[in-house]
Amino acid sequence: MRIIGAMENTTAPAYRSFVAVGDSFTEGMCDELHPDGSYRGWADLVAARLAAATPGFRYANLAVRGKLIGQICDEQVGVAAAMGAELVTLAGGLNDVLRPGCDVAEVSARLGDAAEKLAAGARRVVLFTSADPSRRLRGSARLLPAIVRMKEFVAELARQRPEFVVVDLFSAPCFDDPRLWAEDRLHLSPEGHRRVAEAVLEALGAPAGFDWRAPLSAAPAQRWAARRRSDLRWVRIHLGPWVVRRLTGRSSGDGRAPKRAELAAYEG
């Protein structure tokens, strides 16, 4: 087993094809936008580096925001497995954990089944542990037991097959910094995506170009009134609509197609 937690490089390992599977984390929510209006995200950054190193490289990104682990398994895993890519990344389950009454054992079982199916035809399957929200978000401590159980499950899963590697975001204190997160406090900022991309490449054996775990330089202290205004804006613009979607059974990904549904040449 390899559990990775460390460093951008100028070279990348030779993978001829890559499929990314998951939810908003992998879709690239809140990163910079491509000309077509889709988000870039860490997976696209990884694909760009792999494409630069390997002529004929192909890439698909099946991830869709808001998807639960069952939806990822039912809608993406079979499609990804049929593509036969050499590299697959799989991230999911956090949307389930955010919901009250989450059955962590069931979520873990579905994630494990997905990983096994993807590993049957891939050289490498990259898994993730979630960053610890309790160190940066008030009121998120209730999520921690489930996140820790998922973290332990992923680590145990990786011990069972040499094809699995784990990118350990949970143990990286840099992700406690709000600047690695978007205004909604749930999705990564561009800097957060850049660091996750580097972590994935380092997990694949690429030499380090920078230490993605390193803390950011100190930020100016924010006054109490500014913090309260920021909190109120977050509740109004982000938390409130999220709660409404949960209460009405809707998802931000309803009716949304993957941004790269075909395994095709990556041109940036």
Image (spheres, rainbow, N blue to C red):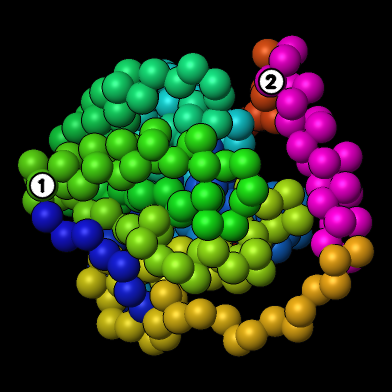
Residue 176 or residue 203, whichever sits in front: 176
Mark 2–mark 1 distance (CA, rounded to whole Å): 35 Å
Is residue 211 shown left or right of residue 216? Answer: left
Write the residue at 16% across / 35% down. 120
Question: Does the magenta run of residues contain 87?
Answer: no
Quarter of the figure with residue 50: bottom left
Please give the range of residues in magenta: 226-248
The crowd level at tag 1 (other Cα within 10 Å; few <14, some 14-19, many 20+) is some
For mark 1, what is the residue? 159
- Quadrant where the C terminus sits is bottom right
Is residue 19 shown left or right of residue 27? Answer: left
Quarter of the figure with residue 257: top right
Residue 44 or residue 112, whichever sits in front: 112
Tally of marks:
2
For mark 2, what is the residue? 246
Q: In the orientation shown, which residue stands out farthest toward the top?
A: 248
Give the mark nearest the N terminus, 2 or 1.
1
Write the residue at 49% across / 71% down. 174
Q: Position of residue 98 (x, y in %)?
A: 55, 31
Q: Position of residue 143 (x, y in %)?
A: 49, 36
| Residue 258 shows in the view | no
Quarter of the figure with residue 165: bottom left
By secondary structure, the bulk of the magenta-drawn segment is best described as helix
Residue 146 or residue 238, whichever sits in front: 146
Disc number at residue 81? Answer: none
Residue 61 or residue 152, whichever sits in front: 152
Look at the numbered disc 2 and give the secondary structure of its residue: helix
Question: Does the magenta run of residues contain 245?
Answer: yes
Which residue type carries mark 2?
Arg
Which residue type carries mark 1?
Arg
